[in-house]
Image: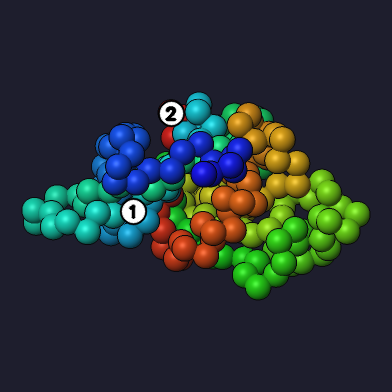
Amino acid sequence: MNTNPILLQEAGPKNPAARAPGLPRAAQLAARRNGIRPSRFFLTVSVAAQAMCWFERSRGQRPKGRFPRYELRRRFVVSTSRFGTGQLMQSNRTPLGLHQVVEKVGGGHPIGTIFKGRRPVGLSWQGQPDGMIVHRILWLEGLEPGFNRGGRVDSYQRFIYIHGYGDESTLGRPQSCGCIHLAAADLMPLYERLPKGTLVWIAER
């Protein structure tokens, strides 16, 4: 029996939740519009729900030219920006739109490792329980030119991550300064499973 309080639900073949929610139509359209090939895994983030869904591409065949079918694997509680959503540099807001995991940071370091400038600087369980960026980092890159890529709206240059946060009691409500916070129990296995290039869709709902 799953006792993890952060994990909302685990979808499987016998679980009705595996049929809903589906991969948002807007995410599919954004990928098509920008010529982005669908990745094996796909993350979606709902700011309104403060939730992240982890999808995996179905192994079934699809008609030529059709977007792949994705199945829900898990749904997690997250925390997005307390300043709301927005694209601009130095706004401390969570950017919207299609992204991908472009870099992974922290592999091999113990759980509780605190990072600053993506370098380990201490451990949360050695006198630093309120670490701002801990455990692992999935660095996001915007894929929509002029919206979250390039100029003053570039998510990569804004250092937008999916990462752990020392105070997990804040999950489920907006708390970050633009990044997406995730519990260690969810982030660690996700970090191991997701390759670079995994697509990430961030939306208001």
Task: Say which of 36 and 52 sits in front.
Answer: 52
- The quadrant in which the C terminus is found is top left
Q: Given this view, does label 2 or label 1 mark the residue nearer the observer?
A: 1
Q: Which residue is mark 2?
A: 205
Instruction: Give x and y (percent) for residue 148.
Output: 47, 46
Q: Amino acid at mark 2?
A: Arg
Against 15, is 54 above or below? below
The answer for how far apart the CA atoms under marks 2 and 1 are is 20 Å
Q: Amino acid at mark 1?
A: Glu
Q: Which image quadrant is residue 65 in?
A: bottom left
Residue 136 can be seen in this image? yes
Instruction: Give x and y (percent) for residue 38.
Output: 29, 56
Q: Residue at x 83, y 63 (%)?
A: 122
Return the mark for residue 56: 1
- Mark 2 element type: loop
Q: Which image quadrant is residue 177 in?
A: top right
Against 69, is 198 above or below? below
Q: Residue furthest front?
A: 1
Q: Residue at x 75, y 58 (%)?
A: 112
Return the mark for residue 19: none
Q: Is residue 165 left or right of residue 95?
A: right
Residue 95 can be seen in this image? no
How does the figure colour the protein chain or chains?
Answer: rainbow
Q: Residue at x 82, y 46 (%)?
A: 130
